[in-house]
Amino acid sequence: MEAATARLGRGGRRKKEKSYGSEERRLATLLLSPAMAVIVLVAAYPIGYAVWLSLTEYSLREPGKWRFAGFDNYTEAFGSTEFWDAVKNTFIFTGISVTLELVIGLGMALAMHSAFKGRGLLRTVVLVPWAVLTVVSAITWRTLFEPNLGLAPTVLDKIGIAGNVVWLGQEGYAMAVMILADVWKTAPFMALLLLAGLQVIPDDVYDAAKVDGATTWQRFQRITLPLLVPAILVALIFRTLDALRIFDLPFVLTGGTNGTSTLSLIAQQELTTNNLIGYGSALSVLTFVVVMAVSFIYIRTVGGNIRSLAED
Amino acid sequence: MEASGGIVTPGTDVRQQEKEREEARVAERRGPRRNWVRPVLMWIAVLVIIVFCLFPFYWLVNVSLKTGSDLSQADLIPPSPTLDNYDSIFKNGDFTSALRNSVIVTTITTVLALIVGSFAAYALARLRFPRKFMLLAIILSISTFPPIAIAAPIFKLWTEFGLYDTYIGLILPYLTFALPLAIYILTSFFKEIPKSLEEAALVDGATYFQAFRKVVLPLAAPGLVTAGLLTAFFVWNEFLLAQTLTSSPKAFTVPVSVANFTGSQKFEIPLGTISAASVVITVPLVLAVIIFQKRIVAGMTAGAVKG
């Protein structure tokens, strides 16, 4: 390596100008190949393999039995309520939690942005939920909603709301706890992304508006919000991608019962609990397609960002 | 890219003054009596945020200090606080081996991601070659892959290769998911280092590798810390692949261990000990956040701000 780079180094120094030096290109290939090798071998190849597996009927319980099944697994998925329930739950979860995270995150970002002394401290505080493992977040909210131990049912019972509800044991309520756990963990993350967006809005825009007599609300509505749209968009898509993949929360909170099964969860359960490699792969591929559709939008949205990194 | 460095430290002073001037102007318009409304609302908002963010974690600590009948009451402070739960998890061989496994897997993945990632990032930030945009777009899109998509094939391949339920079996897929993020963060940090410094080194007869090691790497240290922290957080937190690719305490990581905790009796869910274990595995991350707040925020916003 040392010898190779030394040789390339000399070449690199000799040519300085526009054309890509072939030696510079070779060095780039050399430096990029370990990363690309890992990515191709452990991401690209397995995904291709997953597509292939999804077209077969294969169960670890009967290792000898294998057959090419065409689209049978997909037909089975599209015909099952398990699949459509998971689709419905995943979308409900994503829609509600991402919306709440945006609203709460924006509120937090605005509060943090209003200049005051404790901003550094507040930023640390806000990072605490983000640092909590998702599995631990699920456990925390479980202990908060547990029938006797939990604070939430106890308090709600006292003020006469939802007295007899076993939160994690009832459809709708279980989803509410799951959404709450997610909002708690990730609204702060959203807030920090939006705060970064707020901080790049130049002050003189506000000054001009103030000179013209705009009220605080008008300034928020006409200046802050429109200028924040790019940051909001990126944060929204980013969180949507994450929410669509949700697995940890339903696994720990309910095991996917009571209307909380999600796409990743049922796919994983078919694989490991039922050992259905073919069918599980089909569910994984379907999850992949949904997520990648959003990912495509994400890449398009941050395209300018990538381009500025790619500039020479 | 200014997103990684510049945004985190805004012109607080200027904005502070501006704020004060504005508040003065508002006060003037509204008369002296409304003066206190804004700061009070402000502090209420701050208080709400602090309680919202910290209370659930406090609750977890609270539950972890309860045993026996305390666990069927919703006291805000444990009536008879005890460290019994902590005592019992550290006597639990499965949990301590999960801690060891997680430390090993996280360390190795992070170190590898930083080495391999900084090579790639250096090429992307400094060398000229075609189709760089496409490469970066592919790398970024890999980071959005749902882990479940590779779970089935990796599960099957690892059983065939004997990598199922091993450290390497976890490190490889983790590296795949951690690398795009590390590369992206490091590339934006490397780009901020003035080219002239390296060029000076090269003119003085240094090789590319020497220029990279002696000039770029030390200057990129904050970037390496940021990328390393985010990688470590990701690995420590990852659950789906760990749950799918391990089956014994030999390779269980902490999230798997905690999520599948069972009590001395099979059907009892020992919330006290689960909470204690949860606190133990979260505390290092909370400490890291307190110490490295700036670096972490820089990394989180590096990819996402400008749009």
Image: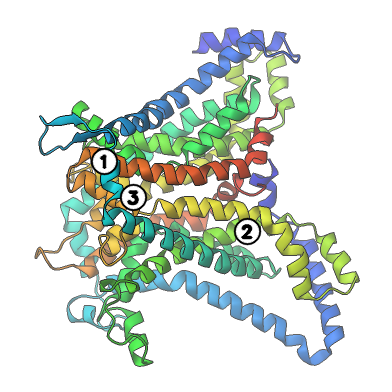
Q: Are marks 3 and 1 in contact (CB under 8 Å)?
A: no
Callout 3: 10 Å neighbours few (<14), some, many (20+)?
many
Does mark 1 fall on the same chain as mark 2? yes
State which tag comes first along the sequence, 3 or 1: 1
Name the residue carrying label 2: A194
Instruction: Tell me what residue is drawn at x 73 percent, y 57 percent.
Output: A227
Neighbour tally class for label 2: few under 14, some 14-19, many 20 plus, Cα within 10 Å:
many
Mark number, residue A264: 3
Q: Quadrant of the C terminus of chain A?
A: top right
Left or right: residue A291 versus residue B32 is left
For label 3, the SS is helix
| Cα separation between marks 2 and 1 | 42 Å
- Do circles 3 and 1 both sit on a common chain? yes
Q: Hey, what amino acid is under mark 3?
A: Ser
Marks 2 and 1 close (CB-CB < 8 Å): no
Evaluate whether residue B253 shows in this view: no
Nearest to the eye among marks 2 and 1: give it: 1
Q: Nearer the viewer, residue A273 or B180?
A: A273
Image coords of residue A105 (percent x, y): 57, 65
Pointer 1: what residue? Answer: A73
Residue A144 point in image, percent of width and height: 33, 74
Q: Nearer the viewer, residue A296 or B59?
A: A296
Q: Position of residue A294 (x, y in %)?
A: 51, 47
Tell me if I can see residue B255 in this picture. Answer: yes
- Relative placement, left or right, of B103 versus B112 is left
Q: Depth-wise, is mark 3 or mark 1 nearer the camera?
A: 1
10 Å crowding of disc 1: few (<14), some (14-19), many (20+): many
Q: Residue B267 at x, y = what percent?
A: 11, 66
Residue A288 lies left or right of residue A214; in this view the side is left
Which badge, 2 or 1, is on the more N-terminal residue? 1
Provide the secondary structure element on which disc 2 rests.
helix
